[in-house]
Amino acid sequence: MTRRFDGRDDEADDDLRARLARSGEPVPLRESLERLFRNLGAPPVSVITRLQERWPDLVGPALATSTRPIDLVDGVLTVACSDGAWAAQVQWMEAQITARFDEVFGPGRLDRVVVRVDR
């Protein structure tokens, strides 16, 4: 089951699709993208934007300079690290990052943190 960040359910999406099909009106691109992301298990664009902006607050300035959030799907945050040492630091801080994420974005949205070393 896909975790939803907006609190809407699949019936709400069905209602929206039916309403749009009846109206024949064009759908704003943002609405279409948000629906696509939601169906893929990704959070709304606003959450990703805030995550990028608040990353130093979540992990601290030192860690933020060598890491970056790159993906958030179905409660799994993927973090890119500049080298293995920073990846180990992110893994070690997973509980703290999750707790801070819950404070900023609300509880229960992040289950785990996965790291990837970008070379």
Image (tube, rainbow, N blue to C red):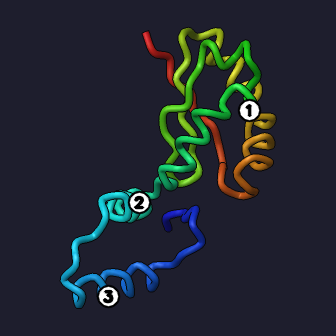
> Which label was assigned to residue 71?
none
The image position of residue 112, as x and y in percent, is 65, 43
Q: Earlier in the sequence, mark 1 or mark 2?
A: 2
**Disc 3 or disc 1, which is closer to the eye?**
3
Q: Is residue 95 left or right of residue 84?
A: right
- Quick one: 25 or 71, which is closer to the camera? 25
For label 3, count other residues whose C-alpha is less than 10 Å away and answer few (under 14), some (14-19) or many (20+).
few
Q: Is residue 26 left or right of residue 85?
A: left
Q: Find disc 3 in the rendering and name its residue.
A: 19
Q: Find disc 2 in the rendering and name its residue.
A: 34
- Quick one: 61 or 116, which is closer to the camera? 61
The image position of residue 94, as x and y in percent, is 73, 33
The secondary structure type at the circle numbered 2 is: helix
Q: Earlier in the sequence, mark 3 or mark 2?
A: 3
The secondary structure type at the circle numbered 1 is: helix
The secondary structure type at the circle numbered 3 is: helix
Mark 1: which amino acid? Answer: Leu
